[in-house]
Image: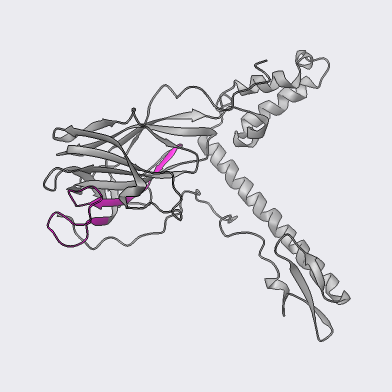
C-alpha cells in the first residue's frame, strides 16, 4: 500500500544546520538593515526553513520582520502593512560576537524561486545598534540553497520610520549589505515520475537502469511491478548517486541552450514556410495566439515586410543561449549611495 501512496517531500529537515555567513568589514552601524533572500531552484528541494539570524552591535530592543506572501509587482515594499513581525526581544551589547535571534517560533519558509525580505531593527537610541556594510558585490552570499542580496540600511529609531534620528533627510540608505549569519534547513522533494526531471543526471540514469532491469526476464527485478520500483526510487535521496549542485546547475544551462536552439530551428522552419508559400497569395502561416501573416506586395510574395527578419519572435529574452550566469543574477548594478552614514 505504501508503494501506491508515495510521499512527495521528505518529513525531516537536514540534521546539520546550514550556516550562511556574510563578509564583515564593519563599514557602518545604525538602527536597522533590510535585505532580500532568495531560495534557489537548482536542487530538488520543497522548501527552506530559516531558523535564526545573527547580528552584532549595541543591539538593544530588537525586532525581526519578514515580508508577507503578497504579489506587489515583484517588489519588496517598505510599507509596514506588507510586513509581519516574527521576533521581539531586548539584547545586550555584543560588538565582537554575533548574537543569535531565534526564529524557531515563527520560522521563515521559502519555496524554490521565492524571494522574501528580512528586516532587522533596533529602537536603541544612537547610531551603534546594528553593524552592516557597504555593497561590495551583486550577491552578499550565495550557496546551493540561498542567495542573500544587498538591501537598505535604516537610520530611524522607529520601525519603518521615514524620519532619521537627526530629524531631516532620507531615513533609508541604498546599496548596503547585511552582516551576520543565517541558519536554515532544507526539506527535499522525493522522487516521483512527475519530479523526474528535477533530479540530477546520475539519479535519472539510476531510474532508467532500474526499469531496464525490470524489463529483462532474467533479472530479479522483473518480478517487481512498476509501483515497487517507484517506491524504491522514492526512498532514495537526491544525492545518493553523487549528483552535485554544480553538476545540476550546468545541466540546467545545457537544457536552456538546447531549448534555445530548438526554438531557433522552429522559427527558421516557420520563416521558410512563409517565404515558400507567399507566392500562393496572402494566407496565415501559423497560429498559437501570435498569427504569422504572409502578404503580397505588387504581386511578389513577401513575409512580414521587406525582408522576413521580423516575421516572428519566438522566445523571450530571459532564456539566452549564451547565458553563462545563474538565473539569480537578475540585479542591475546600482550606483553607490552618495549619502554617507553617520
Q: Which quadrant holds residue 24?
A: top left
- Relative depth, front residue between 24 and 48: 48
Is 95 on the left-hand or right-hand side of 248? left
The residue that appears at 58% across and 47% down in the rendered structure is 253
- 246 with respect to 280 (left or right): left
Decide if residue 294 is on the left or right side of residue 206.
Answer: right
* Viewer-proximal residue among 197 and 127: 127
Counting labels gives 0
Query: For this view, does 266 lie left or right of residue 36?
Result: right
Quarter of the image for the C terminus: give it: bottom left
Front one among 55 and 240? 55
Q: Which residues are magenta?
A: 145-173
Q: Position of residue 312 (x, y in %)?
A: 69, 67
Query: Does 156 appear in magenta?
Result: yes
| Quarter of the picture holding the N terminus | top right
| Picture residue at 50% right of the left edge, 39% below the top | 112
Residue 245: percent from the left, percent from the top? 51, 36
Reply yes or no: does residue 233 show up in magenta.
no
Amino acid at each position: 500500500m505504501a508503494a501506491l501512496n508515495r510521499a512527495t517531500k521528505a518529513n525531516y529537515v537536514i540534521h546539520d544546520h546550514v550556516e550562511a555567513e556574510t563578509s564583515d568589514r564593519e563599514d557602518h552601524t545604525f538602527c536597522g538593515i533590510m535585505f532580500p533572500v532568495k531560495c534557489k531552484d537548482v536542487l530538488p528541494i520543497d522548501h527552506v526553513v530559516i531558523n535564526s539570524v545573527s547580528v552584532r552591535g549595541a543591539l538593544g530592543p530588537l525586532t525581526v520582520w519578514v515580508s508577507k506572501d503578497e504579489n506587489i509587482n515583484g517588489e519588496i515594499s517598505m510599507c509596514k502593512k506588507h510586513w509581519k513581525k516574527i521576533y521581539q526581544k531586548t539584547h545586550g551589547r555584543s560588538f565582537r560576537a554575533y548574537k543569535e535571534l531565534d526564529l524557531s517560533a515563527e520560522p521563515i519558509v521559502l519555496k524554490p524561486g521565492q524571494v522574501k525580505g528580512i528586516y532587522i531593527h533596533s529602537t536603541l537610541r544612537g547610531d551603534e545598534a546594528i553593524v552592516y556594510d557597504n555593497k561590495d558585490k551583486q550577491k552578499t552570499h550565495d550557496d546551493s540553497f540561498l542567495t542573500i542580496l544587498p538591501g537598505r540600511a535604516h537610520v530611524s529609531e522607529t520601525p519603518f520610520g521615514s524620519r532619521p534620528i537627526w530629524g531631516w533627510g532620507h531615513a533609508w540608505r541604498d546599496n548596503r549589505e547585511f552582516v551576520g549569519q543565517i541558519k536554515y534547513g532544507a526539506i527535499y522533494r522525493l522522487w516521483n515520475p512527475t519530479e523526474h526531471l528535477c533530479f540530477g543526471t546520475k539519479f535519472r540514469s539510476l531510474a532508467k537502469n532500474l526499469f531496464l532491469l525490470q524489463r529483462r526476464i532474467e533479472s530479479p527485478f522483473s518480478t517487481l511491478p512498476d509501483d515497487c520500483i517507484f517506491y524504491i526510487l522514492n526512498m532514495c535521496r537526491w544525492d545518493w548517486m553523487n549528483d552535485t549542485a554544480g553538476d545540476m546547475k550546468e545541466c540546467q544551462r545545457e537544457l536552456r541552450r538546447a531549448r534555445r536552439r530548438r526554438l531557433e530551428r522552429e522559427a527558421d522552419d516557420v520563416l521558410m514556410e512563409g517565404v515558400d508559400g507567399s507566392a500562393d497569395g496572402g494566407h496565415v502561416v501559423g497560429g498559437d495566439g501570435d498569427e504569422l501573416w504572409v502578404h503580397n506586395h505588387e504581386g511578389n510574395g513577401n513575409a512580414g515586410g521587406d525582408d522576413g527578419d521580423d516575421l516572428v519572435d519566438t522566445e523571450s529574452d530571459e532564456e539566452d543561449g549564451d547565458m553563462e550566469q545563474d538565473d539569480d543574477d537578475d540585479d542591475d548594478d546600482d550606483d553607490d549611495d552618495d549619502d554617507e552614514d553617520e
